[in-house]
Amino acid sequence: MHNFVFLDGESGMFPYYNTVDQLYHSQWVAGKLSRLALLQKWMGELWQGGHPTRLIHVAGTSGKGSTTRFLESGLSLLGKTGALTSPHLFDVRERFSIDGQVIAPERLTTVWEKQIRPLLIRQHLENPKHTPSFPEITILIALTLFAEEGVQWGVIETGIGGRYDQSRALSVMASVLTNVGNDHEHMLGSELWQRVVDKAGIARQGVPFFTSEQHPLACQIIREICAHEGAALTFVQDNMLADIRHWLGDIPLPEQALLQGQHQLQNAALAATTLQALFPAIQLPTLVEIWRTLKLSGRFSTPAPDIVVDVAHNPDKMQAFLAQLIPYLQTHFSATKHVFVVGISGGRSALRILRPLLPCAAHLVLSSAAYKGVSLAELQAELTTLAGDVPLHWVEQPHTALHTARQLQQAGQAIVLTGSTYLIEQVLNPDPYLRHLNATFGWRDALIR
């Protein structure tokens, strides 16, 4: 007869919990890992001697895009750089940058027609089930651009999670984890520890791992996963934040600079820690100086004097956004409450995202993006329990939401667009053709299922 000992998060057990999780979902795991093997096969065919660009891999709930931007900019001190980020705001080209600049339309067309589309056709003829998916295609496009443009240093962020994300197929020189919070629970797990195990799964043997995570349990899990994989682990130290603040000094930053947000200092500290560990010759004052003017589309931008935009699409991002937004509104506008245009996407909880807005909202204008948007019917059902006296306005067509907000806006009030990236795109995209293409992503694929 066996004597069972029940463990409660005992030290060293999280690699085992990962094993149990994989055993319980072996068919699903096999499918995911097989796709990673397929992507590695395609990369081997395209670059038989190995891809020439040295890569940094970035994962995390919040701050991936900003950290990638800081890393890409810092690596420019060493040579030509490139990056792959997601999602895009207005144009798929935004995902691909060379030396910090979005690629030209004709550049993407050439890579697609000459390199990627032929591979797509070959794979479909061999086995339709092995046809590259959209995330896999974007990775192959980025790698093709990097190779053709002579990119020496590249940064690639995960789409969702880490251990099963398509970008996990890459060989990299460093793994970077910003943090683990509350997002994609329906895909990564309802418990924090499940999401940490997944995102820390970007750890690789012999590859240094850097993180700015601070939650005690998350840090324990990251230590265990890195030890199991044989990845040297570095946590961002508080003195790095202090040093960045010191070198920023009292010189005012541009209004829409990334470093205006206090939460962005943590992302900058993570990037600086990574870069200085890999390349000790890089000096922090030099990094801070080139980061002063960095911007990122959709992060605290002001496309008009009375409009503020931020793609704060999960609870953690919303809290960080509000910490930056409220002082800005108090400084630039006379009103104490403002008009918010909000959409929710990807099965997220509207209550958790919207409740923090109530104290500074005069009106909430709610709409639903055609792509991945939570429907108005679902929003209405969930928000019946939303406390407060803030009027809710339901708008069927996203592109009319701004017009509705304008009608509600009073003197001294700002209009704040936030939440779903896809809704903001539908409201603000100046290109009607791209707006339609983005809204109907994948409709042809649905015809063949």
Image (cartoon, rainbow, N blue to C red):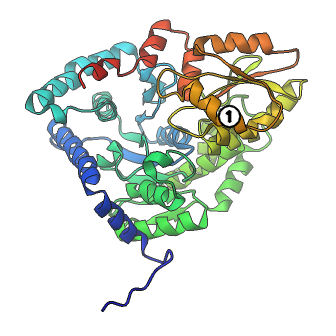
The crowding category of the residue bearing disc 1, from other C-alpha atoms within 10 Å (few below 14, some 14 to 19, many at least 20), is some
Q: Quadrant of residue 446?
A: top left
Looking at the image, the residue that sits furthest to the left is 126
Horizontal side of 407 relative to 228 (left or right) equals right
Residue name at image x 82 percent, y 33 percent: 360
Q: Nearer the viewer, residue 14 or 381?
A: 381
Q: Nearer the viewer, residue 124 or 5?
A: 5
Which corner quadrant holds the N terminus? bottom left
Give amino acid for label 1.
Leu
Horizontal side of 275 relative to 336 (left or right) equals left
Q: Nearer the viewer, residue 287 or 238?
A: 238
Residue name at image x 25 percent, y 41 percent: 51
Horizontal side of 109 relative to 181 (left or right) equals left
Where in the figure is residue 352, as x and y percent of width and height? 66, 43
Residue name at image x 34 percent, y 13 percent: 106
Q: Quadrant of residue 255?
A: top right
Where in the figure is residue 326, as x and y percent of width and height? 80, 35
The residue to which callout 1 is attached is: 383
The tally of labels here is 1
Looking at the image, the residue that sits furthest to the top is 432
Where in the figure is residue 108, as x and y percent of width and height? 33, 19
Which corner quadrant holds the C terminus? top left
Whether residue 419 is visible here, answered yes or no, is: no
Where in the figure is residue 141, as x and y percent of width and height? 30, 29
Residue name at image x 48 percent, y 39 percent: 72
Q: Say what secondary structure mark 1 lies in.
A: helix
Horizontal side of 39 relative to 332 (left or right) equals left
Whether residue 203 is visible here, answered yes or no, is: yes
